[in-house]
Image (tube, rainbow, N blue to C red):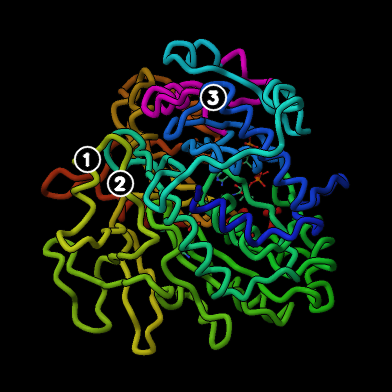
């Protein structure tokens, strides 16, 4: 019986070749991966997981955690990774919405999550960063030879939550073929082979680290160094025995500030990829001057996987995201009408292809609203295509802040700030930040006579919002600027506070 995604992974695996090495010296071959993911898949089935059941996972990065993703694919389950920064308040929403049959947590956070999981009828098991925990104990005696559950190209492999412009987060439903087709395309486009070793320093609960990085390595039968998180010293050390790295712009900002980044340090490397947020042309240029490597920038979304990429051979143009990938149709339209703009003009980027998701989990109306009649997905990103065919992202139609590669929807943060006693209203904006690209910033109006300060606002958010969503600064103003329609003029606020973080330049890690 065929399992669309895993069959391809299985076919690319070279049994004795190394798949993952960790910085503390642990290593797994492809054979180990097949056996361990088989044990975990057998365990999932024993725990009653049926095809289509969601398995929610909020654990620290480890090879075992990646193999749990593969086990879910093999067992026909729907993998639901959750950012480790999410608070219990945020988890309550995700678990209630996705209704997983099983929640896998770190032992540290188990007690907090247990009542939430029980309320929604989910079982809880644990997995820690060292590869221990109750799930692994159950798997120790399970069968490594697992007959994969049959899954067709259109069956769900994963749900990844993306923040909503209005209301709560939406679960993007990704099929086996969404993931497989995109990973195959990227493997070929970026020339991945068994000879490659990737520096993997991204988290594995988002598309970038989970699908782009890990699936490409798997389909190439290549290997990777698994770092718990990005560390410039460690990345530089590993470059001497690696061939590629994938990262968010913050990785490259931190690397160019490191005295160890030289031509010699990067001599063994063949490819540096950047994505998830705009890479400054200056970072691209400085990196090239220091190493001789032109960073390859690409563009994607949780809903669409990767859409465009600069070429492997040919000009990697700073400030552009390159060409639509093979099999991906991309057009630029008038946002309101959806009709194509004139050549070179700016408009809404829309995409269509096997990479584009199936819809938002249990939100048919929202799904319908984001697609055109002819099947193109409306990305919410504003862009243009230049005369050479390179796509430029010029802005965002959606009110979104991207900080260190993580998306933050201002509305969600504003809603929490507005609940703080003494707050009249708030506007959350992203302003240039030398390390994170954009820094989440709250502009707050307080009731007259109330002695509310920055610390009190931030303190009230601690247990409500993931750390990366919390404002780096809170500014108090008498009134928010509004246009004649009464809408807050965020562009004016962004302008006014554009220098807020400039004193941090040169001091980032
Ligand atoms: C950590 N902090 C952050 C961020 N990360 N604050 C804002 N934005 C962030 N991204 C907080 C920490 O909790 C800490 O708070 C303080 O900021 C400083 O932390 P630091 O040690 O400097 O951070 P770090 O641990 O080094 O992490 C920075 C990072 C990391 C390496 C940029 O955030 C990261 O790995 N980002 C990658 C995100 C990613 O994978 N995105 C892809 C999404 P305090 O000290 O005050 O407690 S997928 C996607 O976007 C699409 C599909 C695509 O195209 O790829
Ligand atoms: P996410 O919802 O986390 O998948 O983030 C997707 C968003 O990240 C896109 O809609 C873009 O706004 C942004 N993004 C991803 N890659 C790039 C890039 N290379 N340049 C600019 N923005 C990007």
Q: Position of residue 33 (x, y in %)?
A: 72, 46
* Labels 3 and 1: the sequence-earlier one: 3
- Mark 1 to mark 2 CA distance (whole Å): 7 Å
Give the number of the disc on residue 103.
3
Answer whether residue 330 is visible to the viewer in this image: yes
Q: Quadrant of residue 334?
A: bottom left
| Front residue of 427 and 323 | 323
- Left of 62 or right of it: where is 155? left
Cα distance, mark 3 to mark 1? 25 Å
Residues drawn in magenta: 85-112
Work out how far the residue at label 3 is from the one at label 2, CA to CA, in angstroms. 23 Å
Residue beneath label 1, please?
364
At a point 68% along the width and 28% down the height, the residue shown is 127
Task: State if disc 2 and disc 1 touch (CB < 8 Å).
Answer: yes
Q: Which mark is residue 359?
A: 2
* Contact, mark 3 vs mark 1 (Cβ under 8 Å): no
- N-term-proximal mark, 3 vs 2: 3
């Amino acid at each position: 019986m065929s399992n669309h995604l895993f069959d391809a992974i299985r076919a690319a695996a070279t049994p004795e070749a190394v798949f993952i090495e960790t910085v503390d010296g642990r290593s797994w071959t492809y054979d180990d991966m097949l056996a361990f993911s088989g044990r975990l898949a057998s365990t999932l089935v024993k725990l009653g997981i049926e095809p289509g059941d969601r398995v929610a996972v909020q654990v620290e990065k480890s090879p075992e955690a990646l193999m749990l993703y593969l086990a879910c694919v093999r067992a026909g389950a729907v993998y639901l990774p959750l950012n480790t920064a999410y608070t219990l308040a945020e988890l309550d929403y995700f678990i209630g919405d996705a209704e997983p049959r099983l929640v896998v947590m770190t032992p540290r956070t188990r007690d907090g999550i247990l009542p939430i999981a029980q309320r929604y009828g989910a079982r809880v098991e644990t997995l820690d960063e060292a590869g221990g925990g109750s799930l692994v104990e159950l798997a120790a005696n399970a069968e490594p030879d697992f007959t994969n559950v049959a899954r067709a190209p259109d069956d769900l492999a994963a749900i990844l939550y993306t923040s909503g412009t209005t209301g709560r987060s939406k679960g993007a439903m990704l099929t086996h073929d969404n993931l497989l087709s995109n990973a195959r395309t990227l493997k070929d486009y970026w020339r991945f082979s068994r000879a490659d070793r990737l520096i993997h320093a991204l988290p594995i609960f988002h598309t970038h680290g989970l699908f782009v990085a890990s699936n490409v390595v798997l389909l190439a039968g290549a290997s990777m160094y698994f770092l718990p998180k990005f560390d410039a010293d460690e990345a530089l050390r590993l470059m001497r025995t690696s061939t590629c790295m994938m990262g968010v712009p913050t990785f490259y900002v931190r690397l160019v500030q490191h005295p160890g980044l030289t031509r010699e340090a990067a001599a063994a490397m063949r490819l540096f990829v950047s994505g998830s947020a705009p890479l400054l042309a200056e970072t691209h240029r400085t990196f090239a001057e220091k190493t001789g490597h032109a960073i390859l920038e690409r563009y994607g979304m949780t809903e669409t996987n990767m859409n465009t990429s600069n070429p492997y051979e040919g000009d990697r143009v700073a400030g552009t995201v390159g060409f639509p990938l093979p099999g991906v149709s991309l057009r630029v339209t008038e946002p309101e009408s959806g009709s194509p703009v004139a050549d070179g003009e700016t408009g809404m980027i829309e995409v269509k292809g096997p990479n584009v998701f199936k819809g938002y989990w249990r939100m048919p109306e929202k799904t319908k609203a984001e697609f055109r009649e002819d099947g193109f997905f409306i990305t919410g990103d504003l862009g243009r295509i230049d005369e050479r065919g390179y796509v430029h992202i010029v802005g965002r139609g959606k009110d979104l802040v991207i900080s260190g590669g993580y998306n933050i929807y201002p509305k969600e943060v504003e809603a929490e700030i507005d609940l703080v006693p003494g707050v009249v209203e708030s506007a959350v904006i992203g302003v240039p930040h030398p390390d994170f690209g954009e820094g989440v910033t709250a502009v707050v109006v307080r009731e007259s006579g109330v002695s509310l300060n920055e610390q009190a606002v931030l303190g009230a958010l601690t247990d409500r919002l993931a750390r990366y969503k919390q404002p780096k600064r809170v500014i108090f103003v008498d009134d928010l600027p509004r246009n004649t329609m009464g809408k807050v003029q965020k562009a004016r606020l962004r302008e006014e506070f554009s220098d807020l973080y400039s004193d941090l330049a040169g001091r980032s890690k």
